[in-house]
Image (cartoon, helix red, strand yellow):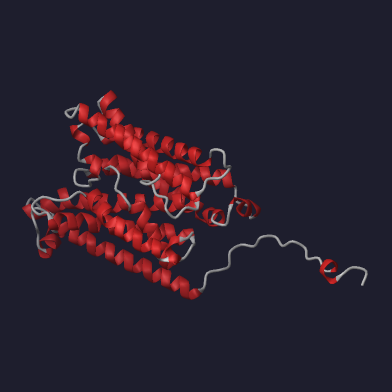
Amino acid sequence: MPENSASAVRKEPRAPSAPPRDHPALNRRRLLGLVLLVAALGLLALASLAHGSNALSYGQVWTGLWDRDETQASLIVWELRIPRTAVGVIVGAAFGIAGAVIQALTRNPLADPGILGVNAGAGFAVTLGVGLFGLTGITGYIWFAFIGAALTTLLVYTIGTAGRGSASPVTLVLAGVALSAVLNGFSTFLTLIDPETFRSIRSWGLGSIARTDLGDTLYVLPFLLAGLIIAVCLSGALNSIALGDDLAASLGTKVVRTRVLGIIAVTLLAGGATALTGGIAFVGLMVPHAVRWFVGPDQRWIILCSAAAAGVLVLAADVLGRIIARPGEIEVGILTAIVGAPVLIALVRRRRASGL
């Protein structure tokens, strides 16, 4: 042969192929998991309607739901418990989806709106708005929360990519934790030097769903729905980005557009949820981790199941906080932070759950 066998047989480079189709058994497991999550969400919603400083039996809850009148049980269910339960489900879903999107965008399993400073940025902007402009309601909070969330996301990503060309998971986490500490420090400093001015956001800063009414929720809901729609539309592109920017581009994914839209989705979701309830820690970190363990790396299923699982987590923390501290309660953000650390350690130790 004029050429040796190694050089004579030259294979043409193959174009990158799309990820293989899902196995039917995996899809059945995903569907079963989603059904179980929805069932758990329904049971926790019922528990949320029954438990509180004024406990109701499940028979009273049922009667209050269907026979709306001026009785105490009916008023408690419709005026207090239903709005609170709705807020828990909506805000939990928003933080869960925001965490799933930001983990996919950064290819970093440790990313979430709290660790990357998004919640802290939104909270600091709201604190500034209260101090400088006397904001007193959600209609003012939300715009400052959006601005703070967006600027913090961009700043963390800029710091993480400075001089490197691409952001590594470690630098993003370090930048987010450092920036979060600084912004939380400034927020605390402002509230301490003028406690009277910032009295209205004291419990809000702990992550509370108790004082949010249905009108505030309906005001924020369109922004959260917009963020959800963007996240769902990006799910296919996020699957490609998980393979790396170069391979994603070769598969036809517009990487820059996907990242910009992803940042917009995270800003709408995390900013809107933070404006409603303050930052609720670890939801956006724990939930996508756990969901990825049983649905695999497909972002379409991760986003869908994260919405349900995060609602389950927030409602469970809220009901638990009402039960163990009756007739008072423990804020949701405190309980998710207490539960979050050991759960995160357990998840990180599972190799299947810790990688993207």
From what the image shows, is residue 332 above or below residue 33?
above
Find residue 178 and report its horizontal and vertical position in percent: 39, 40
User: Outermost residue toward the bottom?
Assistant: 25
Horizontal relation, residue 293 to residue 63: left or right:
right
Viewer-proximal residue among 59 and 326: 326
Residue 10 can be seen, yes or no: yes
Image point (47%, 38%), residue name: 154
Viewer-proximal residue among 68 and 84: 84
Residue 189: image quadrant is top left
Viewer-proximal residue among 277 and 202: 202
Viewer-proximal residue among 252 and 337: 337
Image point (46%, 45%), residue name: 172
User: Outermost residue toward the right?
Assistant: 2
Horizontal relation, residue 97 to residue 239: left or right:
left
Horizontal relation, residue 286 to residue 234: left or right:
left
User: Outermost residue toward the left?
Assistant: 71
Q: What is the count of numbered marks?
A: 0
Find residue 217 and report its horizontal and vertical position in percent: 28, 44
User: Outermost residue toward the top?
Assistant: 132
Image point (43%, 35%), residue name: 151
Find residue 170 and report its horizontal and vertical position in percent: 47, 49
Residue 141 can be seen, yes or no: no
Find residue 195 and report its horizontal and vertical position in percent: 18, 29
Image point (28%, 58%), residue name: 313
Residue 344: image quadrant is bottom left
Quarter occupied by the N terminus: bottom right
From what the image shows, is residue 71 above or below residue 148?
below
